Amino acid sequence: MKMKTRRGWKAPKALILCVTMSLMIIGTNEAAFAAKNEIVFGFGTAITGALSYAGMPSKKGYEAWAEMVNAEGGIYVKELGKKLPVRLIYYDDKTDPTTAARIYEKLITQDKVDFLLSPWGSSIGFAVSQVVQKYKMPVVFIWISSDPIYKQGYDYVFGCIPLASRTGWSGIDVLMDKKVVTKPPENLYFVTAKELYPKTADRGAMEHARDLGFKNLYYEEVEKGCKDFTPIITKMKKTGVDGVFTSTYYADFFVMYKQILELGFRPKFVYSAHSDLIDFPEAFGAKAVEGVCSHGLWSEQWGTFENKKFVETYQKKWGEEPNQWSATAVSAQLMKQAIEQAGTLDRERVKKALEDGEFKTMLYPVKYVNQGGYTNLNIRAFAGLLQWQSGKLLFVYPEDVGVAKFIYPIPWAK
């Protein structure tokens, strides 16, 4: 049958075929969406390897989040007019960037997941960022903060926490806050590992210290896995260093702190980006770590969005307390809200929702901006300061999120 207008015009066969095929495709897509009965999220994390101390809590956090969401019926998708439960697919990246990149490619091309969730660690995130940009899959990174990742112009990668170069600023700010510290350290020594995150974090903190007026600043890099910090500690003692700032990883810092104690070095201030594990006071004793600081990005005590429910779900599911790395589930929190705001499972529209929307999380609000050569930064992000006091790691700065007063100088146990 030929299509006609009232004037007798006949539509070309090619046009009829094109319209027919378009209608068939639309019908097929609608049928596929209508048949959709779950939303599949995929991620990789360090179940084994050097970063498993963070990878396992991350995995548990995602699973607690999924249980919490499914208990409410799932994620509402407006264009489908219904809620869909969520399902997780995950793999062990073994703390290896190359393995992580392969995992995320597999999740996209073979597992055909609907959306991706964040891995853990900047070196891993750098490799994964290239994969998600290649396949145009939006992902919210958390605990992945090294500046170069967000200077690639990759618009499918969204940050959440502060840039690594700004993560340690609270440790500098508190020392220059005259309401808190009347006489700050005169000599600050920065010790960092030759890895992406530690170098970025310590250099950023040192530049911030210089901007705030610190005069005597020292900087030194060590190999990851360093077993002997005695030459550096000896140098600190001779130089009269009274403030130590480091972003070396957990194992390295534990070695360094052990040797600080053994050599009788007693600075007024010690900050380590990686002194926040419960293993720290267990390894040295609560009195020996009193006053040591770290950065803080989340607390189970906060009254932030869904935080109480998440903590309760995590405790019930795993029989243990969540830690900071458990809050990797914020990546999933944000993706859920973006899907609901977009009203669809279409990735481009979900990406647009991330770019334009405002969100609530267990950490703090999220609003994305492009500024200073960086892409998709959370303008609301901040890092607070944690301090070990009586065997507990407490928020002490800024004062509006603090639950205890900052102790200075360190009251070294005798």
Image: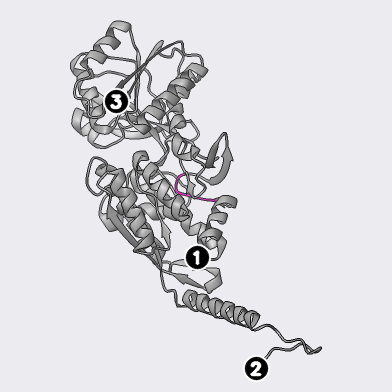
Q: Secondary structure at mark 1?
A: loop
Q: On the image, numbered disc 2 is attached to which residue? A: 1
Q: Main secondary structure of the magenta part?
A: loop
Q: On the image, numbered disc 3 is attached to which residue? A: 290
- Any magenta on residue 64? no
Work out how far the residue at label 2 is from the one at label 3, CA to CA, in angstroms.
Answer: 87 Å
Number of other residues with Cα within 10 Å of mark 1, as a class: few under 14, some 14 to 19, many 20 or more? some
Where is residue 7, by image quadrant? bottom right
Q: Where's residue 372, x and y in %?
A: 57, 33
Q: Is residue 322 left or right of residue 182?
A: left
Amino acid type, residue under disc 1 in the picture: Leu
Q: Where's residue 97, x and y in %?
A: 31, 44
Q: Nearer the viewer, mark 1 or mark 2?
A: 2
Counting residues from the start of the chain, the first of labels 3 and 1 encountered is 3
Q: Where's residue 193, x and y in %?
A: 31, 27
Residue 147 in view here: yes
Work out how far the residue at label 3 is from the one at label 1, CA to CA, in angstroms.
Answer: 49 Å
Amino acid type, residue under disc 3 in the picture: Glu
Give the quarter of the figure containing the C terminus.
top left
Residues 40 and 54: in front is 40
Going 38% across and 23% down the picture, which residue do you hit? 407
Q: Is residue 278 left or right of residue 158?
A: left
Magenta-drawn segment: 359-363
Q: Which mark is residue 345?
A: 1
Where is residue 112, by image quadrant? bottom left
Counting residues from the start of the chain, the first of labels 2 and 3 encountered is 2
- Any magenta on residue 362? yes
Q: Secondary structure at mark 2?
A: loop
Work out how far the residue at label 1 is from the one at label 2, CA to CA, in angstroms.
Answer: 38 Å
Where is residue 203, by image quadrant? top left
